Image: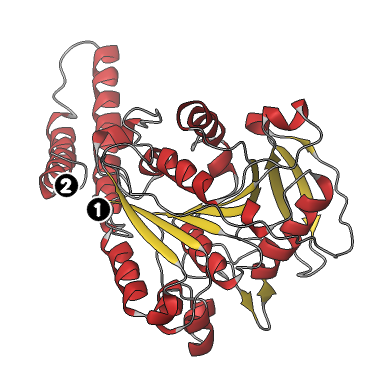
């Protein structure tokens, strides 16, 4: 019996109903001393509240598409056990030659920032983007090799969180630093600079149905400019980051996965590869869907179906148990890219995680080993 099964929901409702009936029938029939009767009534009240809460939570979980689909998800399985590294049996097939390096360097006005310490080895700054005018936080982590060799520039991974969500989703629950360092040891992955900006920097525009979805929306906000130009320029002017697009990748989960897929297609002069962890591929927010032009040009599915797409790489990972953004959406993207002769320059691949998990952090963690290895094969290493 899984947390999203009808039997689980029926059992939770039956238990809540039974506790309510038991409270009515036993309230004045509990034997013993006054203290014993008081304790018994407290047990009935607390038990009834817990049972009712459990029934509501099971209903919310099922109605939302199954955020928790296994009991392991509920217990918070955050280990790397079962993670499949790219190149191992059962992993996505990898191919492609090293991307040639071009001499690209930003000519923007230097953006010097002050950083303070944050969690899990990250530093944080509040950036006011000169291109977008947006003020929001950006978290940066540098690998140990960064301090050990001050002559080298390092590739960058820009990590995008989901909605609802915040950068802390990457810093804490996802254990991204631990997974990256494990992948370096086990699969020869590059040491990356990790950059985690706020994906929903506009107050009040932070819900799944109402946010810019990493786009420039005329008359509203330039979140696309904030995430690409402003954040990138700040990183280049404050860290020894590789300036060439061959050294820049994107990775996001849920809405962040949509953003990663969209931005790599829209900004091939800034990014060379992207990974979408349980993302979706057509806009969800009314900020975009209410305008047919914005809806099209910000839809990864429309872009790979109808336009000449650039020479970039996109990996889409999914879980068979994800009811929010199912694996069928990645198959639709792959089919659309194959059908469009103008999209042949773009490498579009999909990977379904072999382990269970719904639309949640536990499932996305299990996708990280493959994601890091795939990105490392498509982006340049330290130079």
Q: Which mark is residue 62?
A: 1
Residue at disc 1, secondary structure? helix
Question: Which residue is pictured at 61% across the width and 61% down the height?
Answer: 271
Q: Is residue 6 left or right of residue 36?
A: left
Q: Can residue 233 be seen at all in this image of the molecule?
A: yes
N-term-proximal mark, 2 vs 1: 2
Residue 170 spot, x, y in % from top left: 55, 42
Where residue 93 appears, as percent x and y from the top left, is 33, 49
Q: Name the mark on residue 232.
A: none
The residue sitting at 69% across, 27% down in the picture is 144
Structural distance between the alpha carbons of marks 2 and 1: 9 Å
Q: Quadrant of the C terminus?
A: top right
- Residue 207 in view of the camera: no
**Disc 2 on helix, strand or loop?**
helix
| Residue closest to the far top | 33
Quarter holding the N terminus is top left
Q: Position of residue 171 (x, y in %)?
A: 58, 38
Residue 326 pos. (x, y %): 28, 59
Instruction: Establish if 186 lies above or below 136.
Output: above
Q: Nearer the viewer, residue 5 or 307?
A: 307
Labelled pair 2, 1 in contact (Cβ < 8 Å): yes
The circle drawn on residue 9 is: 2
Residue 349 found in image quarter: bottom left
């Amino acid at each position: 019996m899984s947390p999203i099964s009808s039997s689980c929901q029926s059992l939770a409702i039956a238990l809540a109903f039974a506790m309510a009936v038991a409270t009515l029938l036993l309230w004045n029939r509990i034997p013993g001393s006054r203290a014993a009767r008081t304790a018994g009534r407290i047990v009935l009240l607390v038990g009834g509240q817990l049972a009712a809460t459990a029934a509501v939570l099971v209903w919310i979980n099922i109605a939302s598409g199954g955020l928790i689909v296994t009991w392991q998800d509920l217990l918070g399985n955050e280990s790397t056990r079962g993670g499949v590294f790219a190149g191992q049996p059962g992993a996505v097939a990898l191919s492609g030659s090293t991307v040639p390096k071009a001499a690209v360097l930003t000519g923007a006005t230097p953006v010097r920032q002050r950083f303070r310490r944050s969690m899990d080895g990250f530093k944080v700054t509040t950036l006011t983007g000169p291109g977008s005018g947006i003020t929001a936080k950006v978290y940066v982590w540098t690998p140990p090799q960064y301090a050990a060799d001050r002559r080298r520039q390092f590739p960058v991974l820009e990590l995008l969180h989901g909605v609802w969500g915040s950068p802390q989703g990457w810093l804490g629950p996802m254990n991204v630093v631990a997974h990256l360092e494990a992948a370096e040891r086990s699969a020869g992955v590059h040491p990356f600079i990790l950059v985690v900006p706020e994906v929903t920097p506009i107050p009040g525009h932070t819900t799944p149905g109402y946010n810019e979805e990493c786009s420039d929306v005329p008359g509203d906000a330039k979140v696309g400019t904030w995430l690409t130009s402003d954040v990138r320029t700040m990183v280049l002017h404050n860290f020894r980051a590789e300036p060439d697009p061959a050294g820049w990748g994107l990775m996001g989960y849920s809405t962040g996965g949509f953003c990663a897929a969209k931005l790599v297609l829209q900004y091939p002069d800034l990014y060379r590869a992207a990974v979408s962890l349980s993302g979706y591929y057509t806009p969800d927010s009314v900020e975009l869907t209410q305008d047919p032009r914005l809806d099209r040009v910000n839809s990864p599915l429309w872009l790979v179906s109808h336009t000449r797409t650039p020479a970039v790489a996109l990996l889409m990972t999914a879980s068979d148990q994800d009811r929010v953004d199912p694996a069928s959406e990645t198959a639709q993207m792959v089919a659309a890219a194959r059908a469009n002769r103008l999209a042949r320059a773009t490498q579009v691949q999909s990977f379904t995680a072999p382990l269970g998990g719904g639309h949640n952090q536990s499932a996305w963690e299990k996708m990280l080993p493959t994601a890091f290895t795939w990105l490392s094969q498509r982006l340049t290493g330290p130079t």
